[in-house]
């Protein structure tokens, strides 16, 4: 089993497949994949932090809500993130601290992501962890 994320192509959209030893790791990898679509996160500073906390009625809704919240923060606060400390509970609650920086003129933006969709959405327990899949509207 790989740990991390992979980008997947789907007609006009792009997807992310993330796997981790637990849900918290897999959700963090999914967020990393999202922001690596937006920009090269390897050069970002970590001088801004944002705390996020919310719940949902299942893991699929929690995943879409998580990604759409990150997209909302990017759109409204012009922040890009490169590191995530995520905790996902069995009660479908997510808490996270996101580390990154404000978008500046020297940060090239690659893709504009409009939102996470429910099309082909998966949260699946597998041997050795969890596998997540989401398609993004770009």
Image (cartoon, rainbow, N blue to C red):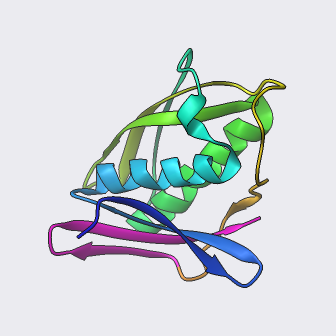
Residue 58 in sight: no
Q: Quadrant of the N terminus?
A: bottom left
Main secondary structure found in the magenta portion: strand
Please tell me in which quadrant of the rendered image residue 131 appears. bottom left
- Outermost residue, left direction? 128
Residue 22 in sight: yes
Q: Which residues are magenta?
A: 121-138
Please tell me in which quadrant of the rendered image residue 134 appears. bottom right
- Measured along the vertical axis of the image, is residue 74 above or below residue 130? above
Image-based side of 68 in relation to 42, left or right: right
Image-based side of 21 in relation to 95, left or right: left
Camera-side residue of 32 and 52: 32
Task: Pinpoint residue 29: horizontal percent, then vertical percent.
Answer: 41, 52
Q: Residue at x 60, y 46 (%)?
A: 35
Q: Is residue 62 magenta?
A: no
Q: Is residue 135 magenta?
A: yes
Q: Residue at x 23, y 56 (%)?
A: 22
Q: Residue at x 58, y 29 (%)?
A: 43
Image-based side of 129 in relation to 77, left or right: left
Please tell me in which quadrant of the rendered image residue 118 appears. bottom right
- Measured along the vertical axis of the image, is residue 88 above or below residue 122? above
Task: Pinpoint residue 112: horizontal percent, then vertical percent.
Answer: 79, 53
- Outermost residue, right direction? 105
- Measured along the vertical axis of the image, is residue 32 above or below residue 114? above
The total number of labels drawn is 0
Q: Residue at x 54, y 35 (%)?
A: 42
Task: Pinpoint residue 128: horizontal percent, then vertical percent.
Answer: 15, 67
């Amino acid at each position: 089993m790989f740990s991390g994320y992979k980008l997947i192509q789907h007609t006009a959209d792009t997807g992310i497949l993330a796997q981790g030893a637990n849900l918290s790791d897999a959700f963090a990898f999914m967020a990393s994949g999202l922001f690596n679509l937006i920009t090269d996160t390897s050069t970002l500073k970590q001088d801004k932090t944002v705390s996020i906390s919310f719940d949902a009625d299942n893991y699929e809704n929690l995943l879409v809500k998580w990604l759409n919240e990150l997209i909302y923060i990017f759109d409204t606060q012009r922040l890009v993130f490169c590191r995530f400390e995520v905790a996902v509970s069995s009660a479908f609650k997510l808490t996270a601290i996101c580390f990154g920086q404000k978008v500046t003129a020297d940060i090239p933006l690659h893709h504009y992501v409009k939102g996470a969709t429910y099309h082909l959405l998966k949260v699946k327990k597998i041997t050795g962890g969890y596998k997540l899949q989401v398609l993004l509207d770009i």
